[in-house]
Amino acid sequence: MEYEIQKGDPISKVTKHLGVSWDEFRKLNPHAVAQSKNTGKWYIKEGKTVEGPGSFQAKLNEAQGEEKVKPASDNVKNNHSIEYTIKPGDSLWKLSKEKFHIPVDRIIRDNGILNPNTLQVGQKLRIRVESLPSEKLVSPSSGKKETVVASWYGEQYHGKVMSNGKPFDMHKDTIAHRDLPLGTRVQIENPATRKIVDAMVTDRGPFISGRDIDLSYGLAKKLSVLEKGISKLLMKVL
């Protein structure tokens, strides 16, 4: 189960919603908690997406339950992979959802992880940022416009590694999409202004229900949707 922390959410509400204790919540979601320097009290960060234990365990069981999994060297053949060093505060969910935007079970399988709590600072992981041939990808229909719900992301992620292995540039014309192959070129139109911009799929997301694509800051600015935050746009694959 996932939940996006809303402004004013008390800790008790979020932990009850996820069905976890406060200690369990902190272990599962270190990226979403902080401690006040003045009072020493813990608080949760607005806008962070957090997880309950069931969702991770399901993925872990699925990865462990496969009787035969090809070695990582075979799985990543003809796919781009990078080496990542675990840093303080990292978790599998943080790497999956916030940093690389790839399925958590892919990280589990490619690195033979049996227990997420055994991750150590300094440990190196192999991160595969392209899809396995067996993973289902959407076959885009070129030339056909579809209505999409778009949000945008910018400075908070500027410079961070995207799913294609390159740093995110908030000023370039790029989008995040859950299924379209990385490198796919698309055309996006704001029907309210008739402004049309070409862009490329370079990242995975969005991971919030009801949204279809995430625009870069630069793209959102060109399409005049910065102030709205969430907009209905038209998109077609080129």
Image (cartoon, rainbow, N blue to C red):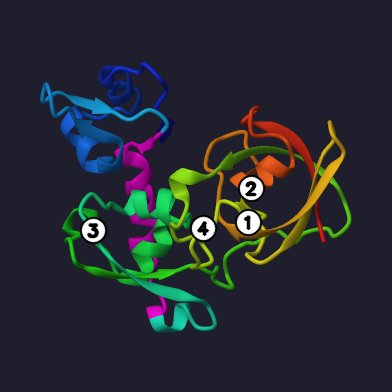
Is disc 2 in contact with disc 4, using a CB cutoff of under 8 Å? no
Dot label at residue 172: 1
Quadrant of the drawing holding the N terminus: top left
Q: Going from the N terminus, do you reach mark 2 or mark 4 first? A: 4
Report the amino acid beneath label 2: Gly
Report the amino acid beneath label 4: Phe
Measured as percent of width and height from the top left, residue 180 is found at 67, 58
- Closer mark to the observer between disc 2 and disc 4: 2
Report the amino acid beneath label 1: Lys
Q: Work out how far the residue at label 2 is from the one at label 3, CA to CA, in angstroms.
A: 30 Å
Whether residue 216 is visible, yes or no, is no
Measured as percent of width and height from the top left, residue 54 is found at 34, 40
Dot label at residue 218: 2
Is disc 1 in contact with disc 3, using a CB cutoff of under 8 Å? no
Q: Work out how far the residue at label 2 is from the one at label 4, CA to CA, in angstroms.
A: 11 Å
Q: Work out how far the residue at label 4 is from the one at label 1, CA to CA, in angstroms.
A: 8 Å
Q: Is residue 52 magenta?
A: yes
Q: Measured along the vertical axis of the image, is residue 123 above or below residue 47?
A: below
Measured as percent of width and height from the top left, residue 217 is found at 60, 45
Residue at the spot 40% in from the left edge and 83% down from the top edge: 73
